[in-house]
């Protein structure tokens, strides 16, 4: 929409949107077939209670009796590649938008575009920062308390901050927030 505004409706037809969504869903399912099939072959001993909010590969590997030595590394590589591939795709998309905004001759259009993009990048940074800290930062090891905190952050707090970040772009919301902060300083 930013790079080719006049051709946007032609490029983003319903067929193309369906194709993009289908590719995302199919890739998402196919990417994890190998780790899921390998983890499902594990034997589990001791407590079969997952000490976490979600049933994730790290927690399942921690419950396994004797997982093969390559399995944690393999799961780490798959998870890291998914996170990094999607992050790089987003960054390449934003680089194209920045390139288009820089070569735009109208200042007001480019400022509005950069303003919108900054909100999007804030949301992406919050989400991917916590995901990277959880999945890539631990090198596939299970640190239960830290992973619980990171899971809570990226599954609950980051989506909760989305409306706040996007609302702060609205001038009326900014003015109301400034008035509220001034009242608190006076009181």
Image (spheres, rainbow, N blue to C red):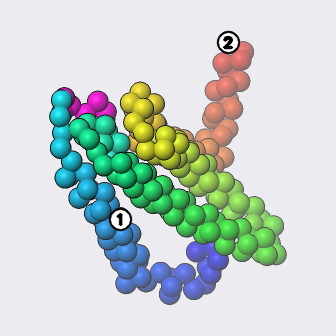
Residue at the image position 34 percent from the left and 51 percent from the top:
71
Q: Residues within 10 Å of mark 2 (few under 14, many from 20)?
A: few
Q: Which residue is mark 2?
A: 187
Query: Is the C terminus in the top left, top right, bottom left or bottom right quadrant?
Result: top right
Q: Up-down: is 171 above or below 153?
A: below
Q: Which residue is mark 1?
A: 31
* Label 2 secondary element: loop
Residue 15: x percent and y percent? 37, 84
Could you tell whether 65 is left or right of 15 in the image?
left
Q: Nearer the viewer, residue 167 or 56?
A: 56
* Image disc number at residue 71: none
Q: Nearer the viewer, residue 130 or 117?
A: 130
Residue at the image position 18 percent from the left and 39 percent from the top:
44
Could you tell whether 46 is left or right of 3 in the image?
left
Residue 48 on the magenta segment: yes
Residue 147 on the magenta segment: no
Give the mark nearest the N terminus, 2 or 1.
1
Q: Nearer the viewer, residue 15 or 174?
A: 15
Residue 100: x percent and y percent? 72, 74
From which residue to which does the magenta span run?
47-52
Q: Main secondary structure of the magenta part?
A: loop
Residue 173: x percent and y percent? 61, 41
Query: Is the N terminus in the top left, top right, bottom left or bottom right quadrant?
Result: bottom right
Viewer-side label of 2, 1: 1
């Amino acid at each position: 929409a930013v790079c080719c505004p006049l051709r946007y409706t032609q490029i983003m037809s319903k067929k193309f949107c369906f194709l993009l969504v289908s590719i995302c869903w199919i890739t998402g399912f196919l990417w994890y077939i190998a780790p899921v099939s390998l983890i499902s072959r594990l034997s589990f001993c001791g407590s079969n209670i997952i000490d976490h909010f979600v049933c994730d590969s790290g927690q399942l590997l921690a419950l396994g009796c004797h997982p093969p030595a390559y399995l944690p590394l393999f799961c780490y590589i798959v998870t890291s590649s998914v996170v990094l591939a999607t992050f790089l795709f987003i960054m390449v998309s934003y680089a194209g938008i920045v390139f288009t905004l820089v070569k735009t001759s109208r200042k007001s259009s480019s400022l509005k575009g950069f303003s919108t993009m900054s909100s999007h990048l804030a949301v992406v940074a919050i989400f991917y920062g916590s995901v990277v800290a959880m999945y890539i930062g631990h090198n596939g090891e299970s640190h239960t308390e830290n992973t619980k905190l990171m899971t809570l952050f990226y599954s609950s707090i980051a989506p909760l901050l989305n409306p706040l970040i996007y609302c702060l772009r609205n001038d009326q919301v900014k003015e109301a927030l400034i008035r509220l902060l001034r009242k608190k300083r006076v009181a």
